[in-house]
Image (cartoon, rainbow, N blue to C red):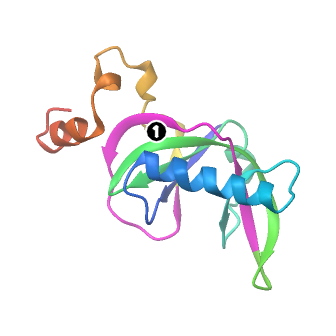
Amino acid sequence: MTLHLMKLCVGCDSIEDLAAWQKKRLADQRRKGVKKPVLRHVTRNTPKRGAELIDGGSIYWVIKGVIRVRQRIVDMKAVVSDGEPHCALILDRKLVRVVPRGMRAFQGWRYLEASAAPADLGERKDGLVDMPPQMVDELRELGLL
C-alpha cells in the first residue's frame, strides 16, 4: 500500500525556489565528477514504513505553510552524516504541483496516507492549473477553494 511523507521546505518561498535549489544540487554533483547525480533529501530518522514509501509514495513539500508540490520517492539509502547514521530519500527530479492545502508547522516529517494526499493540479478540470499561485493562495485564504 502506498504511503507518502510531508516535509517542511524550510528556506524556500516558492516552487521555483525549490526547483532552483535542486538544480544547483545536481550541478554541484556534476562539478564534483558524479557520473549519475541524484536528488536526495537526508533525514536523521529512517522511516519504519519505508517499503510503503518506495511503493509509489511521494514527499509532499510544505512551502510557506501550504502543501504545494510533491516528488516521487524512488529509493531510500542508509548514509552517514557527521559520523551519525541518517537516511537519504532518493527523489525523482520531476516536481508535481498539487492542489494547495494549508498545513501548520511541524518538526521533521509526517506520514501522509494516500487517501488524504492532495490531488495533482494536472488532474483538475476547473482552471486552477492555469491560475497564478498568488491568486490560488488568496482564493484559498478567502475560503473559496
Res 59 visible = yes
* Residue type (three-letter) at the residue carrying disc 1: Ala
Q: Position of residue 129 (x, y in %)?
A: 35, 24
Nearest the viewer among 129 and 113 is 129
- Which image quadrant for residue 40? bottom right
Region of the chain picked out in magenta, as a range? 86-110
Q: Position of residue 89 (x, y in %)?
A: 70, 56
Q: Residue drawn at (61%, 36%), measured in percent from left and top? A: 94
Q: Position of residue 105 (x, y in %)?
A: 36, 65
Q: Secondary structure at mark 1?
A: loop
Q: Is residue 48 left or right of residue 71?
A: right
Res 49 visible = no
Q: Is residue 129 above or below residue 6?
A: above
**In the image, farthest residue toward the bottom:** 83
Q: Is residue 137 above or below residue 120?
A: below
Q: Is residue 68 above or below residue 128?
A: below
* Viewport quadrant of the C terminus: top left
* Viewport quadrant of the N terminus: top right
Tell me if residue 145 is in the magenta stretch.
Answer: no
Residue holding disc 1: 117
Tell me if residue 90 is in the magenta stretch.
Answer: yes
Q: Position of residue 67 (x, y in %)?
A: 39, 47
